Amino acid sequence: MIFNNLNKINHIIFSYPDNIEFAWDEMIKNKETIEKFKITYNNINIYQILNYIKSYNTYIPYIEEELLKNNMPTDLKYIPIVESSLNIKALSPAKAAWIWQFMPETAKEYWLIVDEYIDERYNFYKSTKASIKYFKKLYDRFWDRKLVIASYNRWQTAIAKALEDQNANNFYELKINKETTNYIYKVLAIKYIFQNIEENKPFLKRFFLNKKPKEIIEINWEIKDLKEWAKKNNYDYNFIKENNPWILSDYLYEWNWELIVK
């Protein structure tokens, strides 16, 4: 059975860290912050984590690679785990979508197409690059790593206004909504849980799904009927739709598209 060694796995994954930091920014060690971190850390259960692990290799290595290319802290790779649980069907009541939970307006601001035919929030590669651009903007605006995380969750204008209104200098001086406060601690908890996982990959490797190589082709012409086009070119239509969820219909207007076909 897959959970025969559950107690051993639980001990490995939830080994408590000695030092708590995010992107080289040390968490202030006072009684209140440590207690909040411990509560959050202990409330994440092993079944959730094992579910995240299944999608880890599909998404996280590429995110880390892009962060490194852009000289951004790789700790940011844990944010989509908290945002969406790496669930491809994630859609919030406010219509924030997929891995990075972009709102339609924010997506368009970062050059993602969102219309009746295309929703590039569901294009993992493009939405990841857009998210990194967004992080860069947040880093330019805020000096505190935890404020960057908070503003990703709450809206940067709301965080900036709260800082000004409260004359606060950092996250710990700021009184904000409970959801965003908890969000910060959950990102920290996920980081340390996954660090433990990475250090013990030989024991946990059977839980990881290997990332399969994909064949991507470039298209810069109109496709009036994706079903017919796939059949004509000996592609599996269902595979194309499943692996390109940003295509909302069977129509692609003329543009520069990258299509996963195998």
Image (spheres, rainbow, N blue to C red):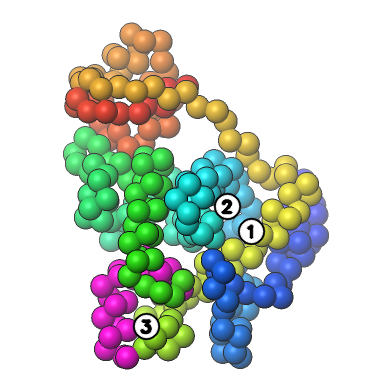
Q: Nearer the viewer, mark 2 or mark 3?
A: 3
Residue 81 appears in the figure: no
Residue 195 lies, with reference to residue 245, above or below; the image says below
Residue 225 lies, with reference to residue 50, above or below; the image says above
Residue 94, how many percent across, how many down? 28, 61
Residue 217 lies, with reference to residue 17, above or below; the image says above
Q: Which residues are magenta?
A: 146-167
Q: Residue at x 51, y 59 (%)?
A: 73
Give the secondary structure at mark 3.
loop
Q: Residue at x 42, y 32 (%)?
A: 243
Q: Which label is found at residue 52?
A: 2
Q: Would you identify the image quadrant in which residue 221 lies?
A: top left
Q: Residue at x 44, y 50 (%)?
A: 70
Residue 177 appears in the figure: yes
First reached walking from the N terminus: tag 2 or tag 3: 2
Residue 87, how many percent across, how many down? 47, 49
Q: Nearer the viewer, mark 1 or mark 2?
A: 1
Residue 155 within the magenta-colored segment of the rendering? yes
